Amino acid sequence: MPTVAQLKSLYRVSYQLTYIMTQPIHLICVDNRTRNIYILAGYDEELEFQILPNGEFADEPN
């Protein structure tokens, strides 16, 4: 179950992706191991985000 902080960040990034950037969101799921929310977006599925339980975004080099 996502935390309140994660849900707030998820709403913010979803709004920016769909209404500001007009990018589709393909997948939103919770990683049961880390409890991070994972978002896959973009026309070519090139945008990836992970939201930590504290609501911050994970910084991972690609």
Image (spheres, helix red, strand yellow):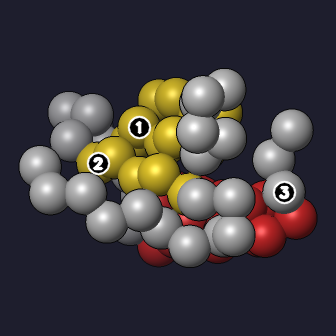
Write down the quadrant of residue 30 in the picture: top right
Q: Tell me the amino acid under the disc marked 2.
A: Leu
Quickly name the residue at label 2: 47
Relative image position of residue 45 (x, y in whole percent)? 27, 34
Instruction: Describe the element under mark 1 as helix, strand or loop.
Output: strand
> Of the residues tagged 3 and 2, which is closer to the observer?
3
Quickly name the residue at label 3: 3
Instruction: Describe the element under mark 2 as helix, strand or loop.
Output: strand
Write down the quadrant of residue 43 in the picture: top left
Q: Tell me the amino acid under the disc marked 1.
A: Leu
| 3D distance between C-alphas at marks 3 and 2 | 22 Å
Between residues 54 and 42, which one lies in front from this camera angle?
A: 54
13 left or right of 41? Answer: right
Residue positioned 41% across, 62% down in the render: 58
Residue positioned 84% across, 57% down in the render: 3
Q: Earlier in the sequence, mark 2 or mark 1?
A: 1
Residue positioned 67% across, 41% down in the render: 35
Can residue 36 be seen in the rendering of this structure?
yes
Q: Residue furthest front?
A: 33
Relative image position of residue 31 (x, y in whole percent)? 59, 30
Relative height, residue 49 to residue 30 (above, below): below
Look at the numbered discs 2 and 1 and tell me whether their residues touch, using CB distance below 8 Å.
yes
Q: Quadrant of the N terminus?
A: top right
Quickly name the residue at label 1: 40
